[in-house]
Image: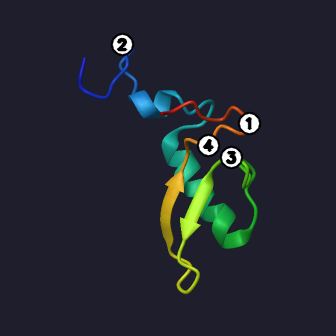
Amino acid sequence: MKVGETLSGEKAKESKMAPKGLKTFAIEAYNLLASGSSSVVDMNDFDIYYDNTTGNILAVDFRVNRRGISNAN
């Protein structure tokens, strides 16, 4: 077992993001911010911090647990 993996060999943080993977959430977070819509997530699934001037994403906090999407600590 490597550092950051679960006993089943999954990446620890990604295994807590059910049913979608972390990569999907990152892409959909960008889609949501850029276009205002996503078929996978909505604004209540996580917090997006971005620069008001440039629109660049500074951070995406997936630890938000409003709808039970993530239990990552």
Q: Residue at x 76, y 62 (%)?
A: 37
Are circles 3 and 4 on residues that touch, CB within 8 Å?
yes
Q: Is residue 69 left or right of residue 71?
A: right
Q: Answer with mark 3 or mark 1, whichever residue precedes in sequence.
A: 3
| Amino acid marked by disc 3 | Asp
Residue count near mark 2 (Cα–Cα under 10 Å), binned few <14, some 14–19, many ≥20? few
| Amino acid marked by disc 4 | Val
C-alpha span from label 1 to label 2: 26 Å
Q: Residue at x 52, y 56 (%)?
A: 60
Residue that carries the numbered disc 3 in the rendered image: 45
Q: Residue at x 74, y 52 (%)?
A: 42
- Residue nearest the viewer, comparing 44 with 14: 44
Query: Viewer-nearest of labels 1 and 2?
Result: 1
| Amino acid marked by disc 2 | Leu
Query: Viewer-nearest of labels 3 and 4?
Result: 4
Residue that carries the numbered disc 4 in the rendered image: 64
Residue that carries the numbered disc 1 in the rendered image: 67
Residue count near mark 3 (Cα–Cα under 10 Å), binned few <14, some 14–19, many ≥20? many
Q: Answer with mark 1 or mark 2, whichever residue precedes in sequence.
A: 2
Callout 4: helix, strand or loop? Answer: loop
Q: Is residue 15 left or right of residue 31?
A: left
| Amino acid marked by disc 1 | Arg
Residue that carries the numbered disc 2 in the rendered image: 7
